[in-house]
Amino acid sequence: MNNLTLSPAKDTLSVICNHQTGVIELEGVSYPQDAADFFNPIYEWLENYIDQVGAAITLNLRINYLNTSSTKCLFDFIDRLEEYYKTGQEVKINWYYEQDDEDIKETGLEFQEDMELPFELLSY
């Protein structure tokens, strides 16, 4: 299994998925023309990780902006992590937000309310 690294563009997140550590890092802004197309390799990597490695996963999110379609894709991704968590696997989400960014904090709170897996909101 390989790691996945996607460099950020003006409208897409930086992505680092490490199969040795189980850490997934998403950082930046996300408002691509086709959010599903952008998130597809991340979904594929996650499914391969679950099938081939089957170990703990930590998702670190440092997002500054999400459009509606990116929010939906991210919700689906986190929902898949929750399914994995419910099988007894260790999954943790860290939602980082700038201390004065109420919009991103609120988005994180909305995600947190819908999930049962460990989900921390961390200001910086």
Image: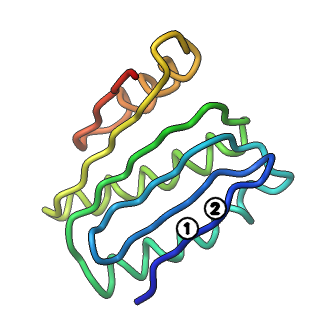
Judge from the rendering whether residue 33 lies leftward or rightward of residue 87; answer left or right. right
Q: Which mark is residue 42?
A: 1
Closer to the camera, 49 or 69?
49
Residue 92 position within the rendered picture, expressed as x and y whole percent measured from the top left:
25, 48
Question: On the image, which quarter does residue 67 sit in?
Answer: top right
Q: Residue at x 44, y 32 (%)?
A: 111
Name the quadrant of the C terminus.
top left
The residue depicted at 45 percent of the width and 86 percent of the height is: 2
Q: Residues within 10 Å of mark 2 (few under 14, many from 20)?
A: some
- Number of residues whose C-alpha sits closer than 10 Å to that of mark 1, classed few (under 14), some (14–19) or many (20 or more): many
Q: Which mark is residue 73?
A: none
Query: Which quadrant does the N terminus fall into?
Result: bottom left
The kind of residue on which mark 2 rests is Phe
Left of 54 or right of it: where is 96?
Answer: right
Circles 2 and 1: CB distance less than 8 Å? Answer: yes
**Residue annotated with mark 2:** 39
3 left or right, relative to 74? left
- Circle 2 sits in a helix, a strand or a loop, which is it? helix
Residue at 62% over, 40% down: 71
Q: Between marks 2 and 1, how big is the CA–CA gap?
A: 5 Å
Residue 102 screen position, x and y as percent = 54, 11
